[in-house]
Image (tube, rainbow, N blue to C red):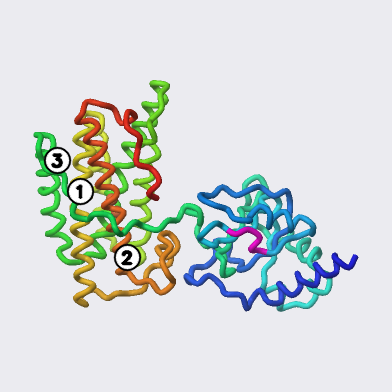
Amino acid sequence: MQMQSAVKGAARRLLREAPRRPQALTGVRSSSGRGIHVLPLHPVAPLPHRGAHPGGLSNMKSLLICNFTPFRSTSMGAMGFSSSAAAASEKNVESSNSTSSSGPLAKGVSDDLKESNDTKISHYWGIAPKAVFREDGSEWPWRSFMPWETYSANVSINLHRHHATTTLIDKIAFRTVKYLRVPVDLFFQKRYGCRAMMLETVAAVPGMVGGMFLHLRSLRKFEHSGGWIKALLEEAENERMHLMTFMEVAQPKWYERALVVTVQGIFLNAYVLLYLTSPRLAHRIVGYLEEEAIHSYTQYLHEIDCGRIPNVPAPAIAMDYWRLPRDATIREVVEVVRADEAHHRDVNHFAADIHEEGKRLKDSAAPLGYH
Ligand SMILES: [Fe+2]
Ligand SMILES: [Fe+2]
């Protein structure tokens, strides 16, 4: 009994303190829009994650003694993210309700949870999404990527590496990219924020196309892919995250949206045909496109350093995705994006080299583990 009353007392204190806990530092409204949650503890499902999980499960076990668990029950590895892993039948309690009315507090946490049954939320088969928190107590605001999918970009990667054009395929690829750059330079000139945003809408296509065809081949041929499906789909997702970042600093105008639709329609079909015809040429072109992307982002950084482009605070999504400090600026974002492009460059030139040797991608292990 003493333990139960102590636990309830602790819960009440948490509810009282909840509004004072730091909200999402990024300024992004939580996905549920409900602030800090208190969740009942049900059979605990381990969270999928990468890397070490020091003490996480033991922490969770220690919480099994009570009828509920507050947030921050599990530390998420080196990133220090937290998550309440009660996946089933979670019931959320708005912290604001907890403090604005003494009624729920007087009746105890269990009554709070019963009252929250009235909340109308659509859940997949009645299972609420896991509530995930940063170490500072603020709720993880993103659903498209989770803390264990974030990473620190390797900014020490060689930015000057260039694949020399030794074969006809290389020369065709190189010339194609150089010609494609002309209209891009004319259209965007030095509007690098807008340029980055628009080009990322195209950059995310090749990885998806290549990954899809390798996936289909794996199904047709009953064979493994050597990790290349995952590598190419990761590249596509990474490029899409570049887009999600840059659209925060350069809102597309109506005619730019129309241009994206048109270019995507043309580029997607062209790249599908190219990949079916010559995956070697397709990967080589992407390799050279990435070299150009590195060059463009270097110019972007130069404009920031010269003061011609304001070094505004980094978008919230970028801080979380690349594990940047909370005072990061767009300059740091451009640096990590440029490092990503260098990684894509190496991956695609490597893929083209494998084809050049007359082998298949599955014959050489894909360079996984960067993201
Ligand atoms: Fe990109
Ligand atoms: Fe890229």
**Which circle marks residue 289 in the picture?**
1
Compared across the picture, whether 51 is left or right of 68 comes to: left
Q: Position of residue 180 (x, y in %)?
A: 14, 49
Q: Which numbered mark, 1 or 2, is in the foreground of this view?
A: 1
The quadrant where residue 190 appears = bottom left
Q: Position of residue 301 (x, y in %)?
A: 23, 67
Name the one closer to the observer, 301 or 107: 301
72 drawn magenta: yes
Q: Kindly report the distance in space between the C-alpha atoms of the residues bearing marks 3 and 1.
A: 9 Å
Q: Kindly report the distance in space between the C-alpha atoms of the residues bearing marks 1 and 2.
A: 24 Å
Label 3 crowd (10 A; few <14 / some 14-19 / many >=20): many
Find numbered disc 2 in the image and state the secondary structure of the residue it sits on: loop
**Which circle marks residue 251 in the picture?**
2
Q: Which numbered mark, 2 or 3, is in the foreground of this view?
A: 3
Residue 164 seen by the camera: yes
Find numbered disc 3 in the image and state the secondary structure of the residue it sits on: helix
- Mark 3 sits on what residue? 173
Name the main secondary structure of what is drawn in magenta. Answer: loop
Compared across the picture, whether 209 is left or right of 292 comes to: right
**Which residue sits furthest right?**
1
Sequence order check: which comes first, mark 1 or mark 2? 2
x 10%, y 41%: residue: 165
Find numbered disc 1 in the image and state the secondary structure of the residue it sits on: helix
Some atom of ligand 2 lies within 8 Å of the CB belonging to the residue at label 1? yes
x 15%, y 64%: residue: 189
Which stretch appears magenta?
Answer: 71-75
